[in-house]
Amino acid sequence: MNQTASEDRPQDIVQEYELDAPPEKVWRAISIPEFREQWLPGQALASTEPEVSAPAEEVRYRMRDDQPPFLESLVTFQLRPAPGGGTVLRIIHALADARLEHAAPSAANDAGPFLMRAA
């Protein structure tokens, strides 16, 4: 797993996983509600309808924390075939609350509920 900041928005959390499953199977797991519910419950989503920007390659979900301050985030799942077979799954977790995008970062030890679920 690689975890890096996005070049576009340094506050984003970006993770990459190499999975031992074909892209078609991974796509079904992240895009079909019955399969997605097994690992990402509907109550974590702000909207159960995904935003598909590239079928079989990229899907986005809006998520909302279930505890105050109830932050919303946009989680993007990107798929591509892995060089040796399988799938590279890239997850980009970005705050959706525009009020917080330009706020000063909080201290690392503030014990706030800033950690979001999907990443």
Image (cartoon, helix red, strand yellow):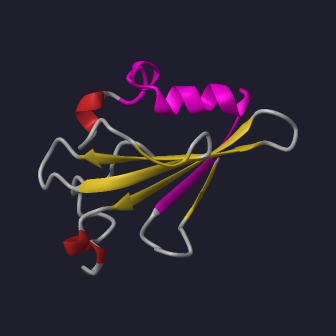
18 sits left or right of 49 in the view: right
Residue 105 image position (x, y, % from top left): 30, 75
Q: Image quarter for residue 98?
A: bottom left
Q: Residue at 42% across / 20% down in the picture? A: 38
109 sits left or right of 119 in the view: left
Disc tally is 0
Residue 51 image position (x, y, % from top left): 40, 47
Between 115 and 90, the one nearer to me in the picture: 90
Q: Image quarter for residue 33?
A: top left
Q: Residue at 42% across / 50% down in the picture? A: 75
Q: Residue at 29% across / 46% down in the picture? A: 63
Q: Compared to 52, does 12 lie above or below? A: below
Q: Is residue 84 magenta?
A: no
Q: Compared to 10, does 16 lie above or below? A: above
Q: Image quarter for residue 41?
A: top left
Q: Residue at 29% across / 35% down in the picture? A: 48
Toward the left, the furthest residue is 68
Residue numbers of the magenta segment: 13-40
Toward the right, the furthest residue is 84
Residue 81 image position (x, y, % from top left): 76, 42
68 sits left or right of 111 in the view: left
Residue 58 image position (x, y, % from top left): 55, 48
